[in-house]
Amino acid sequence: MEIVGEPMAEKVTVSVIKADVGSVCGHTRPHPSMIKECDRILKDGVKQGILQDYYVTRVGDDINLFMTHYKGEDNRDVHELAWNAFYEAARIARKMHLYGAGQDLLADSFSGNIKGAGPGSAEISFEERKSEPMMFFMADKTEPSAYSLPLSRIFMDPFTTTGLVIDVRAKKGFDFEIHDVMNRKKTVMSAPEESWNILSLLGDTSRYAIKRVFSRAGIGTVAVVSTDKLNFTAGRYVGKDDPVCVVRAQSGLPSVGEYLQPFMNTMLVAGWMRGSHYGAFFPCSPERSDPTYFDGPPRICCLGFQLCDGKLQGLEPADPTPGMHKPIDYFAGSEWNFARMNAIKASRFIRSHGPFMPAILGPEEMEYTSKPEVLKELEKRLEDLD
């Protein structure tokens, strides 16, 4: 007699793909017509049956596309849809002579996958739980490893995440997929057993970054970061990547509040002006993410949606229409004024060092540097020390 088990639940995929393809008057924000064009193309993707749902937003000068579907990660149709959206937005930017028009599009045409073509991506596939809160962190003027410090506190520090002590499933720990973004290697390490070894790698933010976090309680992938480094993708330094991070919350995972907790503390990240300085993370709403102080300071935004049968549920409308959502804007409130004030204080302090380290990055991480030319000019004047 054949025993037939229960059918496996279909995995939903949440894809976040972002790119800077042009902005008004320097590194500020995309023109509204660019956002509108991206919305039009993704709405057509829903009509074609490629997407279940979508949301178009931005942080600073980066356009972020949130997309849900049942086609799995690295799907050609989904990635081509995102590429077309950015391509058309860039076409508008070029027509308007906007700054940096098309700068993150490193290929002339779509070739099957958006990876290696410039835009950053973070995709997460899982079996949807009865209640699936999701949070979308978006950063501007910084690099992928900017998330390593807050994610370490969230998933390894019980003084940040009390759930690591009192939640039976969270207490089982988490596995970290860590990428060496320079040598293109990866490894998986476990916390709490290997916590100190994990931190010994992640402390080198110029090289190592968290790509994924997995639950050891059977919940699956719980966090994904875009770790695409544009400087190596292009063969030259063209940007600090402005990464996104997608996380699942509650019920065996860190709570929404525990995910937000680390951002109340001031932390320095690489990027900022010309991609060559350290600055403090500034938590804010997307509407306040325009760089207003020295091309920054680096912005961090966080939006929240409930996932419902593969679709995004926000505050309105009650019956979600694709693309027409109002998310929870976690960093918009006045309680974050304290963190914002401290971020400005820290940024002003480090800026007082001018062109001296630690205000600027090491030479291997500088997006712009004239040092090679200076040294070449001095070749005949440099003498050996006695």
Image: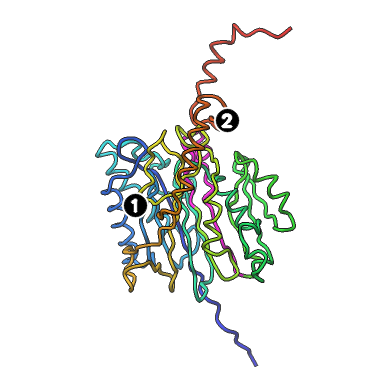
Q: Which amino acid does label 1 sit on?
A: Ala
Q: Which residue is drawn at 70% across and 58% down?
A: 190
Residue 240 or residue 348, whichever sits in front: 348
Q: Which residue is drawn at 71% across and 53% down?
A: 195
Q: Does the magenta stretch include residue 217?
A: no
Q: Position of residue 88 (x, y in %)?
A: 30, 48
> In what element is the residue under mark 2?
loop
Q: Quadrant for the C terminus, please.
A: top right
Q: What residue type is labelled 2?
A: Pro
Question: 168 above or below 151?
Answer: below
- The magenta-colored residue range is 219-244
The first of marks 2 and 1 along the sequence is 1
Residue 299 or residue 122, whichever sits in front: 299
Q: Residue at x 29, y 48 (%)?
A: 34
Q: Give the Cα separation between the discs numbered 2 and 1.
A: 39 Å
Question: 26 above or below 354?
Answer: below
Q: Residue 85 carries which label?
A: 1
Determine which residue is flagged by label 2: 358
Q: Where is residue 340, by image quadrant?
A: top left
> In what element is the residue under mark 1?
helix
Residue 113 or residue 262, whichever sits in front: 262
Q: Quadrant for the N terminus, please.
A: bottom right
Residue neighbourhood size for the residue with mark 2, other residues' Cα within 10 Å, grouped as few (<14), some (14–19), many (≥20) = few
Q: Does the magenta stretch include residue 223?
A: yes
Question: 260 above or below 9?
Answer: above
